[in-house]
Amino acid sequence: MTSAKAKGEPSPSDYALTTEAAVETAAPDLPYLPPMPRDRSIGIALVGAGGISAAHLDAYRAYGLNILSVCSRDLARARARRDAFFPAAEATDDFERVLGDPRIAVLDITTHPDVRVDLMRRAFAAGKHVLSQKPFVEDVATGEALVEEAERRGVKLAVNQNGRWAPHLAYMREAVAAGLIGEVIGAHVAIRWNHQWIAGTAFEAVDDLLLWDFGIHWFDFLSSVIGDRPLTVRAVAAPATAQIVRPPMLAEALIAYEGGQASLILNGAALFGPSDTTAIVGTRGTISSKGPDLGVQSVELHTEAGVARPALKGTWFNDGFAGTMGELLSAIEEDREPLNSARGNLASLRLCLAAVQSSRTGDTVSI
């Protein structure tokens, strides 16, 4: 008697979506750790001593980078940051003094976008390389002009997309770059967490907080694995019932590109059961990560050979911050384009801004 399977009919296990346990295989050795230059003595100034600056300085201290100055309009805040992380550095509220210091080659500008553009232009004119905080700029035209100006001045311009060196995201990116999963046909991120710590802070004034200020990390990651080829974006944002902050705490984006799709689901009002999952699906394999938050993640690489579970070192905070500056310093040392270059970041910015536009208009936006 001919079986159902032999006749090409589905079996009960097909309907039930059951699978067999995969064979354990060795994890590939991939260059996911923060890059560092051979010479870590190059002089750096941090400009802007707000909340995130502590993560920058803590990472630079851990990796032995050379911070010579901390600059802020609020001198007391500059001194507090200096004293906490680099006591031998200068603390100043005089940006021109920083620009005129021949020992300083790189500026890490952590200020908000509304004042950062002018600071970057002044830095280029003084011959300083720049690491810009993210989001890089508020519109693509300004970003393109800054990129061209930096290139014309002969200085490097990179963006602090620190998620690029979060261990799990970096390993997944490198697996894709190495061709381990073939052509990417799906890239999907889903996060639920409580982002309402922003209550009473300046972040509460940001209308598109999840898709813009937070989401730029994930749009940048998606760009790093699918390339600059999205065709359309459809996004929505909405307030969650009983949320206690002003900006919508629910947001989703669906990105279509030739031969595949990408998605981003953000729920910033989840008081319990936090979860952070990412899956990159390719024609020859799938690589995924899961955990309760940004810092605790486990990665699995599934291919025809079986499943590999790399034991990754480090955490997003603050190894990711070391990675952005380390890559810029390495690019300066090797005279090449940094992986987190501002020119490359324009693709991430276009994707992010298209999602914001779609969420505001309700339209599908072409890129």
Image: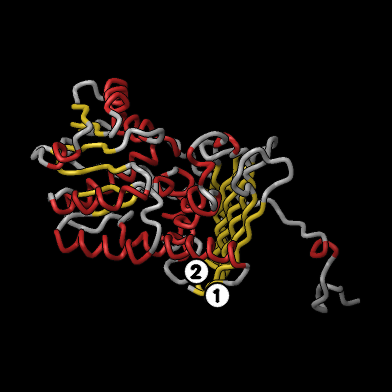
Q: Is residue 101 left or right of residue 89?
A: left
Identify the residue shown where x is 83% and y is 75%.
Answer: 9
What residue is shown with label 2? Answer: 183
Secondary structure of residue under mark 1:
loop
Tag 1: residue type?
Gly
The answer to whether marks 2 and 1 mark residues whose Cβ atoms lie closer than 8 Å is: yes
Tag 2: residue type?
Glu
- Residue 175, picture quadrant: bottom left
Residue 76 x, y percent position in the rendering: 30, 24
Q: Is residue 203 left or right of residue 144?
A: right
Q: Nearer the viewer, residue 283 or 255?
A: 255
Is residue 306 visible in the rendered image? The answer is no
Q: Disc 2 vs disc 1: which is toward the camera?
A: 1
Q: Is residue 5 left or right of residue 125?
A: right
Q: Is residue 302 left or right of residue 65?
A: right
Is residue 189 visible in the rendered image? The answer is yes
Task: Say how the picture is coloured.
Answer: secondary structure
